[in-house]
Each structure stands twice: as C-alpha cells, then as structure tokens.
Image (cartoon, helix red, strand yellow):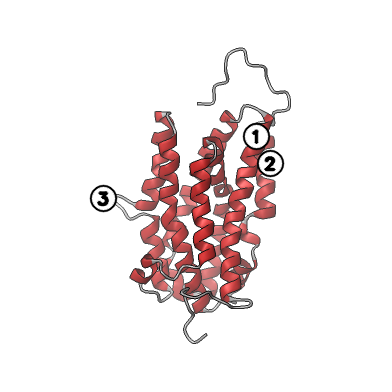
Amino acid sequence: MGIRAVGAPADTNLLSQGELHARLREVGEQRYHHRHPFHLMMHEGSLTRGQLQAWALNRYYYQSRIPIKDAIILSRSEDPDFRRAWRKRVVDHDGDTSADGGIRRWLKLAEATGLDPERVVGGDEVLPATRYAVNEYLNLVRNRPLLEAVASSLTELFSRDLISLRMDRLREHYPWLSGGLDYFEARLHQAPEDAQFALNYAFENAHTRSEQETVIQALRDKCDILWAQLDALYFAYVQPGWPPPGAFRIEGA
C-alpha cells in the first residue's frame, strides 16, 4: 500500500504530509458543518424539542448508511491489510455480539428526544433532500476512485472537536438529552483513530500532485453532503419552516 513504481519520476510539486494535512484542515475550517446555522442554534440552546427530533430522525438515515458506505469501500480494496483495518468501522456502527454499535446508540439519542425508535428506523418521514444527499455519498464511494472514497471520510479530522462542543452544549441546554449521548462518547476516540488511518492512506497513495488535489476535492464534496443535510433541516423546520409532504411534522407546528 502506497509503494510507488520503481523508476517512476518523482513529482516535484507533491505536498508534504504536513502540507497536505494543512490543506485538508483549511477545507474543514471553511466548509465543515460546525459553521452551519442549524448547528449554531443547537449550540446556543435555541432549538425546540421538535426541531431536535427532526434532526435526530433525519440524521439517523445518515447514520444507518455509514456501515453500508464502509462496506462498499471495504469491498473495493484488494489489500487484506487495508480490509482488516477498515472493517473495524463497520463493526463500530453495526455493533457485534459483544457490544452495541453507533446505529443503536443513535436510536437511544432519538428516543431521548421523545421519538419512538421504530418510527425512526422506518425512515418514512425522512426529508427527500436528506435521502438524496446521503445516497449521493454512497454513489461517491461506489463510483469514484478508491483513493477519493477513502479521502471522503476525512471529515473525521474535525469531528472530535465538534462532538466535544456538542456534548457540552446539549448537556447545558437540553439536560433531558443527557441519557442519550453514548453515541458521541464512543466517537470521541473512534473518530481520531479512523481519521489518522485515512490521512496516512491518502498521503501514501496520492502519488502525484493531481491525485493529492482529488483527495482535497473529495473532502470538499463530503463537507457539501453534510452541509446539504442541515440545509434541508433548516428549510423544513426553522426558516421558512416548510416540510414537504410525507416528511416529519413537529407536533403543534
């Protein structure tokens, strides 16, 4: 993994690992969804219970597709070392016989908002734009080069800081959610480990400056997918507050 062909000319424009990391960090600072108005409202404590329910229900659709995304990536690699490392992600979300995974933990959070877990799992009330954005993520990892599919996961470089902030603010502003935060607790140590693996893979396997730029673009595209999901929530449940037919409706709204 990451071995250049013997005798291949070196690309003198290649970014160093530190420079590539800095470029990726710049993308995160500018485009990661920690800046989205919906998240800002969450952290300020200005979301209603109904808006948090809408977030938990729609975000579940994304969470439920993460192990599918990782299984697609897993299936595309012919390197057993890569597959052994990557399959951990599937277990982290699906769980196994010894422990619940992230999907089950997210349902616990949804239940803490007052939602019936079966209603969430059913997925009938997911916003069309949420479904479209998440399915586009699956298309990205299925159809783009493996290097870009792996690089799209590099939003995990930034997630630990957002998760730490979110946990603090949810406990402060929505104490009734405190019993449902196990998902975030687990991701505090899972996400940095996963991010480091993906970062190393991207650096070792982007053999030209052009390939490094595709790594950076894949991260931008993933940030756009995350941002689009929050755009859909904001439009439907904040301003102007127009959920489409069949989508989740806030009680009393």
Q: Secondary structure at mark 3?
A: loop
Residue 160 in the figure: left or right of residue 210: left
Check disc 3 and report the residue beneath it. Answer: 97
Q: Amino acid at mark 3?
A: Thr
Q: Nearer the viewer, mark 1 or mark 3?
A: 1
Q: Which of 41 and 222 lies nearest the eye of the viewer? A: 222
Check disc 1 and report the residue beneath it. Answer: 212
Residue 186 in the figure: left or right of residue 97: right
Q: Secondary structure at mark 2?
A: helix
Residue 90, x across and y down, in percent: 39, 46
Q: Which mark is residue 22?
A: 2
> Does residue 245 appear in this view?
yes
**Residue 214 versus residue 38 in the image, above or below:** above
Q: Which of 28 and 196 lies nearest the eye of the viewer? A: 28
- Disc 2 residue crowd, few under 14, some 14–19, many 20+, Cα 10 Å: few
Q: Tell whether label 2 touches label 3 (CB within 8 Å).
A: no
Question: What's the CA distance linking mark 1 and mark 3?
Answer: 39 Å
- Disc 1 residue crowd, few under 14, some 14–19, many 20+, Cα 10 Å: many
Of pointers 3 and 2, the one earlier in the residue sequence = 2
Residue 196, x across and y down, in percent: 53, 40
Q: Amino acid at mark 1?
A: Gln
Q: Which mark is residue 130?
A: none
